[in-house]
């Protein structure tokens, strides 16, 4: 199978040019709150056009992870957290507009982890919190159409690895992004469970974050340095989906760890063919 070279970086030209010299098949933009000021949004828009002008057509815009000191949680209720709710609302709609204008993709997190319990506690129970999240994702999915996808978390609001939760997610017909490390951590390092989840969701997965992990915490390791069984993962991937290596970098202007992960996976795929 062909392994795509998917690289991630910000909208800063130094990071983009570092990635583009390697001729990636996919570029995923990391965004933050500064990209959604009037000037920042214009800069992001032009950065996407620049990447497209260099021959990269498969582009994903990752919704900002943070609002101030807190994560941009879908499940945070409007009544108790109006500013956070409004930030998620407005930035998601801006990303959808940009994605439609330039025919690219935007990625929204179904949840994160650190503060999720605090927000879940605002609801009568976990089921009510999950339903609130699905209601919001349903609305975003309708607005984004074929330009939006939702990523799994390490939190009970939107996690892959539980077959019942996956059945509920599938019933909404979402376009899915699958982070391998998030599922592996949710399953406490269970490779069989990870492969089962990949197979179960395969037909609705449109994008992967390929990243290794020891299965305990959010460690974002290069492929081959954690405990994920990549030999077992490869046959479970949807060949029509895009992918990037979401690896912690020692230098944000040098994507060596992403390239090393690609070399590892390419060698493994060649050995399996």
Image (cartoon, grey):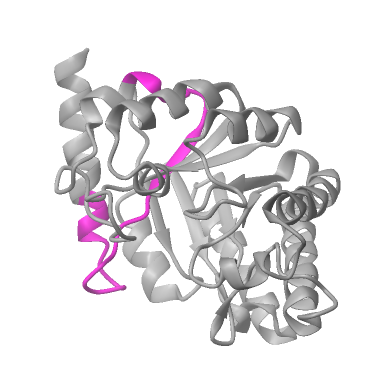
- Which residue is at 80% across, 76% downward? 86
Residue drawn at the location 44% of the way across and 40% of the way down: 243
Q: Position of residue 45 (x, y in %)?
A: 66, 68
Residue 96: image location, x then y, percent: 76, 57
Snapshot quadrant of residue 31: bottom right
Q: Which residues are magenta?
A: 235-259
Q: Quadrant of the C terminus?
A: top left
Q: Residue at x 70, y 63 (%)?
A: 75
Horizontal side of residue 137 vs 54, given as left or right: right
- The image shows a total of numbered marks equal to 0
Q: Quadrant of residue 91?
A: bottom right
263 relative to 14 in the view: left or right: left
In the rendered structure, does residue 168 fall within the stretch colored magenta?
Answer: no
Q: Quadrant of the N terminus?
A: top left
Verify whether residue 245 appears in magenta: yes
Q: Which one is nearer the viewer's eye here, 109 or 165?
A: 165
Instruction: Out of 159 and 117, give the one closest to the viewer.
Output: 117
Query: Percent from the top left, x then y, of residue 137?
Result: 76, 50
Q: Report the side of 178 relative to 102 (left or right).
A: left
State the residue in front, 36 or 54.
Answer: 36
Residue 219 percent location from the top left of the image: 28, 61
32 vs 147: above or below: below
Question: Which residue, as the protein is rendered here, is positioned at the far top?
Answer: 273
Q: Is residue 37 above or below residue 144?
A: below
Q: Secondary structure of the magenta portion, mostly?
A: loop
Instruction: Looking at this view, name the residue that lies furthest to the front.
Output: 124
In the image, residue 185 sits, relative to residue 44, either above or below, namely above
- The residue sitting at 79% across, 68% down in the picture is 89
Residue 145 figure quarter? top right
């Amino acid at each position: 199978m062909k392994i795509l070279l998917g690289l991630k970086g910000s909208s800063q030209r130094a990071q983009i040019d570092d990635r583009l010299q390697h001729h990636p098949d996919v570029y995923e933009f990391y965004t933050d709150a500064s990209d959604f000021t009037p000037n920042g949004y214009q800069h992001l828009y032009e950065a996407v056009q620049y990447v497209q002008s260099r021959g990269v057509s498969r582009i994903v815009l990752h919704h900002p992870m943070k609002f101030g000191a807190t994560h941009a949680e879908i499940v945070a209720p409007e009544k108790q957290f109006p500013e956070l709710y409004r930030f998620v609302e407005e930035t998601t709609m801006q990303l959808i507009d940009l994605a439609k204008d330039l025919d690219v993709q935007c990625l929204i997190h179904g949840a994160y982890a650190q503060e999720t319990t605090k927000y879940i506690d605002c609801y009568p129970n976990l089921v009510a919190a999950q339903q609130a999240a699905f209601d919001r994702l349903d609305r975003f999915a309708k607005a984004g159409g074929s330009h939006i996808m939702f990523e799994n978390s390490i939190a009970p609001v939107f996690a892959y690895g539980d077959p019942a939760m996956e059945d509920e997610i599938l019933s909404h017909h979402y376009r899915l992004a699958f982070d391998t490390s998030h599922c592996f951590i949710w399953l406490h390092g269970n490779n069989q469970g990870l492969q089962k989840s990949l197979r179960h969701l395969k037909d609705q997965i449109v994008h992967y974050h390929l990243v290794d992990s020891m299965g305990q915490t959010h460690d974002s390791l290069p492929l081959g340095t954690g405990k994920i069984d990549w030999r077992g993962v490869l046959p479970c991937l949807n060949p029509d989906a895009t992918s990037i290596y979401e690896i912690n970098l020692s230098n944000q202007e040098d994507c060596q760890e992403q390239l090393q992960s690609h070399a590892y996976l390419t060698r493994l795929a060649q050995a399996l063919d």
